[in-house]
Amino acid sequence: AEMTDFFLALMLPNAGDGLQGIKRGLLELVDMMAVNKADGDNRTAASRAAGEYATALHTMQPRAGDWVVPVVTCSAQKNEGLDEIWRQVLDHRQRMQANGVFEKKRRRQQLRWMWAMVDEYLRRKMVEHPSVKDILPELEKRVIEGEIPPTLAAEEIIRAFSQEM
């Protein structure tokens, strides 16, 4: 969600778990929710689900500026509601650019990208390091089997990696 400009959650009516099954974390991340399959026998269930999501979102603090997370219904199969979704995406971008949130988020994304590249580089160097290669399969096995905690295994990997630096 932090690496995108717009986070749309597509939900299904009658998913079986209801609103209580939705993790609060998802509600904190979305810029919009759309309940799909709002056609035929599902139309009423989709409207009911959208109402439940909207109620839950109403109690939460806006995530980005003054943006109130919209909840809509749609039917991809019948091509209904898709224009509204796109209109909301464009409206969100325009508002975020106007209030400066878009540019701030873009700068944070650049920083996250930088660190992701550093993390990937270091992880690859560690895994390829001869001393780490020697101990890694056994450490992974011992962690999976519960013989040692992940923290101890991580310390051993770091120690093996740094010994020859």
Image: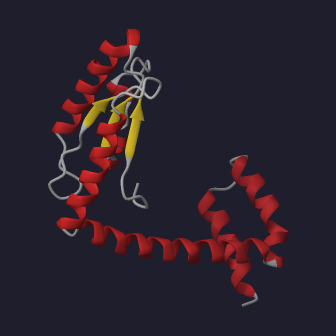
Instruction: Please tell me which residue lies in front, 131 or 147.
Output: 131
Residue located farthest toward the bottom when viewing the structure as drawn: 165
Could one spot residue 31 in this view of the protein? no
Residue 74, picture quadrant: top left
Could one spot residue 149 in this view of the protein? yes
Q: How many marks?
A: 0
On-image quarter of the C terminus: bottom right
Residue 161 horizontal side relative to residue 27, left or right = right
Query: Which residue is depicted at the point 34% across and 15% down?
Result: 43
Instruction: Please tell me which residue lies in front, 113 or 132.
Output: 113
- Residue 127 vertical position relative to residue 147 in the rendered view, above or below: below
On-image quarter of the N terminus: bottom left
Residue 13 appears at what percent x and percent y?
Answer: 39, 20
Residue 49 appears at what percent x and percent y?
Answer: 30, 22
Residue 51 appears at what percent x and percent y?
Answer: 23, 25
Residue 59 horizontal side relative to residue 34, left or right = left
Residue 156 horizontal side relative to residue 83, left or right = right
- Residue 111 vertical position relative to residue 84 in the rendered view, above or below: below
Query: Which residue is depicted at the point 40% across and 25% down?
Result: 75
Residue 52, picture quadrant: top left
Residue 135, picture quadrant: bottom right
Instruction: Please tell me which residue lies in front, 86 or 96.
Output: 86
